[in-house]
Image (tube, helix red, strand yellow):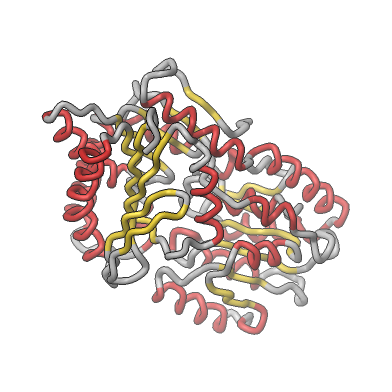
Amino acid sequence: MPEGQKTVCWISSARYSQPLDAAASRKWQLLAGLTAYDIRVIGFATSLRPRRFTEHARFYLLPQPPFSLLRYLVIFCLAPLLLAVLIFRHRGAIIVAQSPFEGAIGALVKSFARLLGLRPKLIIENHNNFEEDLFLQRSIPLKGLYRALMLGAARFAFSRADAVRVISSSTAERARHYAPALPQARFMTFSDTDVFLKMERRIAVEAAEDIVYAGVLIPRKGVHLLLTAFAALDHPRAQLHLVGGAENAAYAEALKQQAADLGIESRVHFAGAVSQHELATYFAAARVMVLPSLSEGLGRVVVEAMLLGTPVIGSRVGGIPDMISDGENGYLVEAGNEAALRAALRRVYDDEDDVAAMGEKARAFAEDFFSPRKYVEGYRQLFALALGDKNRDGMYEATKTR
């Protein structure tokens, strides 16, 4: 490690392949440009085989069991040991935990390190409504006990943190609830926006007829509401593309049955998980992207769709209202309100001039809201906050808020 570099140890439950996929490679390549820092990443491999390799950053990947409960056991049993070794061996200056729950691991290691004379700083990232989102994704046994353990871990983490990274006004508010005095840096999760900026629209937005949903298929995303609204839409040539992996297999099957029951199965296409380039091609041919979430931290697909000049209909939850100005670059609807969603879809098809103007405003907003440069600068400021180089009462925003 070059003299003067500070070691940053990342810990998350993210899965990484070897080699990294295109988006992950671009993200860590950009962060490697923070040459004052030596970045080491703890996460999960894509199989039961642990891996260690270097690609822009140094990766230490835990074996990934097939069941979520086993994954929790692996990360809470093995990650603290691995993180402690990295902190002690490389004199780690910063721990970045990519949720409050991994933050509990970071807080534990930080406390232990202090006993041995080390002073690593702890950053907690808050990307969503961590109190509720898991319970909106799938059925959880012993829900009350699980919730108590989760929130206890989050409180422990926040009580020992030195800075917080948030991605929206709603996640900033939740972080302040737990840690009102901690400095915050606010910027969007990474997107390889070059893919979307370089893509040309295949069909002008006012001439396009198709609708795209982008995101994993889980109950929290409200895709069942979209199917009902789409079935009532009086545009028989419109196709609905559901782009995203079936993270909740039972819910995905229920959606297919719902489409059949509504008589729209021939017009609803389950695309599955796709690359960023493929996602851009869907947006480039869409009249509108719809994100009918019941809860959402931010929803970076909103920005990605807008970069292709595609207006967005989104729920008025989480960080979505930070990006959509109702009637300007898309429409906002109340979460769970199928009638309002149906009305918004109809409005998108009613006036070609309006939707064309919306598309232009959407692209202009997205280009201003996020860039790789702002993402890297966000982490530069975040690390400075954690290390005490900035006013601890301030907030750095790498995204333009309205």
Q: Looking at the image, is 75 positioned above or below residue 399?
A: below
Where is residue 384? Give x, y as percent.
43, 25
Figure quadrant of residue 269? bottom right
Say which of 314 and 204 sits in front: 204
Where is residue 10? Give x, y as percent.
35, 44
Q: Looking at the image, is 352 positioned above or below residue 102?
A: below
Left or right: 128, with 368 as reference point: left
Q: Looking at the image, is 267 positioned above or below residue 307?
A: below
Left or right: 43, with 256 as reference point: left
Figure quadrant of residue 116? top left
Left or right: 50, with 201 as reference point: left
Residue in view at x 62 percent, y 32 percent: 400
Q: Exactly how many numbered labels are in the figure?
A: 0
Left or right: 355, with 396 as reference point: right
Say which of 84 and 249 sits in front: 84
Figure quadrant of residue 209? bottom right
Q: Residue furthest left?
A: 115
Looking at the rendered image, the quarter that the C terminus falls into is: top right
Where is residue 104? Give x, y as percent.
23, 42
Residue in view at x 52 percent, y 52 percent: 335
Q: Looking at the image, is 219 positioned above or below residue 381?
A: below
Where is residue 143? Give x, y as percent.
22, 57
Looking at the rendered image, the quarter that the N terminus falls into is: top left
Residue in view at x 68 percent, y 40 percent: 325
